[in-house]
Image: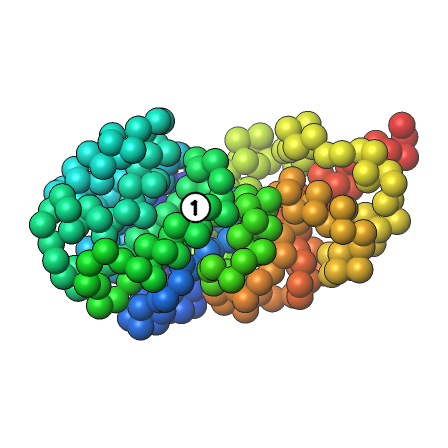
């Protein structure tokens, strides 16, 4: 736990909870430098933004230039870097044109050009770029990652070491990225038991055991439950309504869905259209080369290759199955 880095959780400030294994791995990669962009994919609300912001601070001591960008937080608030770099990136984004939040996502990839042409820097030493949720803002994910790769392979100025991390929870985008050899994909899973306990024990009155079983270590799921007065049914019902699961598809593959509820790894043999649908609706995730080993758990719905994003996500599909039976 690091109380030098505070985060908002359940409407109050908490200390950054243990992500030691993931940070160790990422820092080891950062020390070496990367040749292709690293795409970190994980369940919604598992803590990607928190980890990236923490990593920004850690990388500041290792890299000459570090830039973090999240279009969700806007072109100004979402862009964190040294002031001159920030100004130059935004000014290039204005030249690119179109919606500013999207243009900044493009301009960040042209950082080499920003240094060479706008800041008069010929040798940049080391550059680290952390991109959060950019796939939500850019139209063509494949083109974007190809540009990211080109920026790393053919920088327009001399760079000794680069590190580029793109975080996403968008299931559909992973498929687009996974088709090519343009990135290195890794999974960031929910908090582990120890980190989760560190987090929830900072708030009085929370039952860590019970919340672990309900959320599988996903901090956002705890917040959602708390906002619904701890009613799992309410949260699940809302998620079910918001996700618009394809009931026809579920009905067509009812047996395979039931098997997946019992064991997500059965999805490796399930009809592809079903697996793809569950991934694109952010219900299920494919675990790829995780940043820390993900512990298999039948109770939490975590397999070796596939996992329910949280037990609540699995309950959404269980609810859909019940509606099918009653409908
Ligand atoms: N390591 C951590 N320590 C303390 N709080 C955390 C940690 N990780 C996440 N949180 C808290 O959990 C909540 C969700 O985290 P965060 O926003 O980082 O998730 P995310 O994966 O980026 O979500 P999304 O998929 O919506 O982008 C936030 O309130 C955040 O402050
Ligand atoms: Mg986020």
177 with respect to 283 (left or right): left
Q: Nearer the viewer, residue 43 or 210?
A: 43
Horizontal side, residue 294 vs residue 284: left or right: left
Total number of numbered discs in the rendering: 1
Badge 1 crowding class, 10 Å Cα cut-off, few under 14, some 14 to 19, many 20 or more, is some
Q: Secondary structure at mark 1?
A: helix
The quadrant the N terminus occupies is bottom left
In the picture shown, does residue 262 fall above or below 30? above
| Residue 261 x/y as whole percent | 77, 51
Q: Residue at x 66, y 56 (%)?
A: 307
Residue farthest along the left direction in this orientation: 120
Q: Residue at x 64, y 42 (%)?
A: 280
Residue 66 x, y percent position in the rendering = 23, 53
- Residue drawn at point x = 33 percent, y = 51 percent: 130
Image quarter (top left, top right, bottom left or bottom right) of the C terminus = top right
Q: Nearer the viewer, residue 195 or 170?
A: 170
Q: Seen in the image, is 280 located left or right of residue 260?
A: left
Q: Quadrant of residue 324?
A: top right
Q: Say left or right for 268 vs 66.
A: right
Residue 2 visible in the snapshot:
no
Q: Is residue 244 above or below residue 40?
A: above
Q: Is residue 103 above or below residue 123?
A: above
Can you say whether 130 is above or below 160 in the image?
above
Q: Which residue is mark 1?
A: 144
Residue in view at x 75 percent, y 41 percent: 317
């Amino acid at each position: 736990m690091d109380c030098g880095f505070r985060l908002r959780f359940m409407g109050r400030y908490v200390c950054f909870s243990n992500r030691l294994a993931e940070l160790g791995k990422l820092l080891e990669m950062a020390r070496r430098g990367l040749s292709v962009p690293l795409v970190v994919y994980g369940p919604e609300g598992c803590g990607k933004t928190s980890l990236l912001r923490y990593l920004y601070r850690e990388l500041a001591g290792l890299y000459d230039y570090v830039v973090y960008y999240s279009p969700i937080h806007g072109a100004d608030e979402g862009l964190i870097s040294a002031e001159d770099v920030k100004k130059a990136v935004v000014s290039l984004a204005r030249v690119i044109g179109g919606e500013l939040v999207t243009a900044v996502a493009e301009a960040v990839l042209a950082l080499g050009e920003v240094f060479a042409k706008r800041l008069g820097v010929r040798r940049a030493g080391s550059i680290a770029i952390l991109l959060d949720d950019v796939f939500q803002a850019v139209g063509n994910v494949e083109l974007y990652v190809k540009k990211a790769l080109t920026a790393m392979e053919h920088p327009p100025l001399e760079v000794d070491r680069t590190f580029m991390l793109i975080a996403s929870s968008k299931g559909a985008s992973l498929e687009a990225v996974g088709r090519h050899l343009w990135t290195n994909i890794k999974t960031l899973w929910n908090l582990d038991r120890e980190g989760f306990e560190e987090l929830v024990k900072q708030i009085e009155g929370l039952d860590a055991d019970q919340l672990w079983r309900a959320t599988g270590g996903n901090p956002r799921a705890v917040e959602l439950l708390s906002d619904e007065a701890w009613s799992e049914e309410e949260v699940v019902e809302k998620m079910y309504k918001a996700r618009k699961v394809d009931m026809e598809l579920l009905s067509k593959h009812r047996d395979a869905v039931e098997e997946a509820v019992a064991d997500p790894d059965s999805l490796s043999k399930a009809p592809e259209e079903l697996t793809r649908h569950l991934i694109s609706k952010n219900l299920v995730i494919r675990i790829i080369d995780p940043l820390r080993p993900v512990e298999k758990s039948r109770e939490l719905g975590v397999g070796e290759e596939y996992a329910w994003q949280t037990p609540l996500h699995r309950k959404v599909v269980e609810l859909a199955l019940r509606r099918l039976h009653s409908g």
